[in-house]
Image: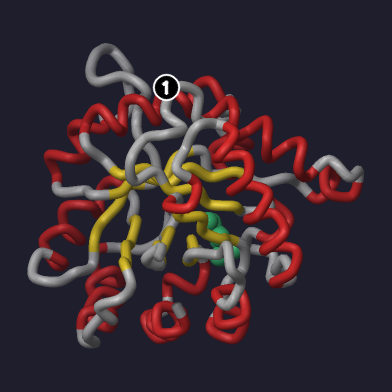
Amino acid sequence: MRRPLIAGNWKMHGSRDSIGILLGGLLAQKLPESVDVAVCPVYVHLDQVVAACSDSDLRVGAQDCSHVDQGAYTGDVAASMLRELGCHWVILGHSERRSYHAESDALIAAKLAAALAAGLAPIVCVGETREQREAGEAEAVVARQLRGSLEGASSAAGLVIAYEPVWAIGTGLTATPEQAQQMHAFIREQMTGLGANADETRILYGGSVKPDNAGELFAQADIDGALVGGAALKAEDFSAIIAAA
Ligand code: PEP
């Protein structure tokens, strides 16, 4: 039985004040014991969020990490530094980093190795663009991203995959539960081929998850939770998604 995980990706949003209010709303309610919950703010808000969550089961993650542990890498932050700060999770290979920062599968694999070495729990994102889906290439793209991004680490304990079709991120378009389930089952099959214990690998769906579509997505056999962007910025919506898991 896989324990659901709901992770909020706050992207580059918020101020110390607005985050304080958001956390206040989230922490005012008791989290269900059967669900893992995480929030992932920008680097500079991590200390505030870690401190606020210290007495709760809400875990904190970063949105990225460096592929190396230290050195002359201006602007980068090492996985070990994030761990030292109190992070549990790290998101890797988000489509916004793949596209705006030209992150390759090989770079993501190096980041994954660094994250695991530092003791962070990685959430590795994969997903096709609209053009790739329309061209019938969605599975081939996802298979290639899995192979490349997980190189050398596909059987790592605790590794989480997030299937995030790029066309559904921040667009209000959601994959139908059937489309998402089909791809999740495909990913699980691929994970077996890559040597992972796929029955235990959590595969999250991401892409315009909202309170009103979360329930039917989570009812699918291979959907083990969600990576949530926009709806994670409202305590009420995020709590409703957690409750649906
Ligand atoms: C995301 O950024 O990971 C995401 C899924 O965003 P949204 O929920 O806003 O589509």
Number of callouts = 1
Residue 177 is situated, as x and y percent measured from the top left of the image, at: 69, 72
Q: Residues within 10 Å of mark 1 (few under 14, many from 20)?
A: some
Secondary structure under tag 1 reads: helix
- Determine the image quadrant of residue 53: bottom left
The quadrant the C terminus occupies is bottom left
* Residue 40 in the image, given as x and y percentages of width and height: 34, 56
Residue 168 against residue 194 in the figure, above or below:
below
Query: Looking at the image, what colour scheme do you see?
Result: secondary structure
* Residue bearing mark 1: 110
Q: What residue is at 42 percent from the left and 22 percent from the top?
A: 110
Question: What percent of the width, then of the height, locates residue 137?
Answer: 83, 40
**Residue 71 pos. (x, y %):** 24, 13
Q: Which residue is drawn at 62% across and 62% down?
A: 207
Front residue of this view, candidates 242 and 208 = 242
- Left/right placement of residue 235 relative to residue 181 reads left
On the picture, is 76 further left or further right than 45? right
